[in-house]
Amino acid sequence: MPVLDPNPQNGQKKLLIVLGSMLAITVIIGIVASIASP
């Protein structure tokens, strides 16, 4: 069973959404910090 399933189950899709949102939040925080830094 591949890690990135083209048609994931509900649990796997929820996990993928959680991981994706965490990654997006980290990227947004990094961008904001780079803009806010002098």
Image (spheres, grey):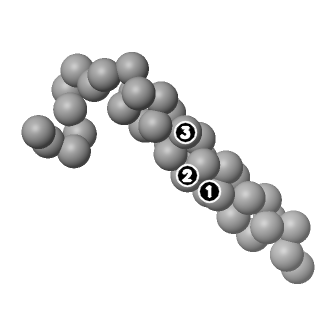
For disc 2, the neighbor class at 10 Å (few under 14, some 14 to 19, many from 20) is: few
**x, y (%) of residue 33?**
79, 67
**Residue position marked by numbered label 1 in the rendering:** 27
Identified by mark 2, the residue type is: Leu
In the image, residue 4 lies at what x, y percent?
23, 39
Numbered disc 3: secondary structure: helix
Q: Earlier in the sequence, mark 2 or mark 3?
A: 3
User: What is the C-alpha distance between the residues marked 1 and 2?
Assistant: 6 Å
Q: Work out which quarter of the rendered image holds the N terminus and state it.
A: top left
Callout 1: 10 Å neighbours few (<14), some, many (20+)? few
> Who's the residue at 87% across and 67% down the image?
36
Asked if residue 31 can be seen in this view, the reply is no
Disc 1 marks a residue whose amino acid type is Val
- Which residue was labeled with disc 3? 18
Can you tell which quarter of the image residue 34 is in? bottom right
- N-terminal label among 1 and 3: 3
Residue drawn at x 14%, y 42% is 2
Q: Quick one: SS at disc 2?
A: helix
Q: Position of residue 32 (x, y in %)?
A: 78, 59
Using the image, determine if residue 14 lies above or below residue 19: above
CA distance for labels 1 and 3 = 14 Å
Q: Which residue is mark 2?
A: 23
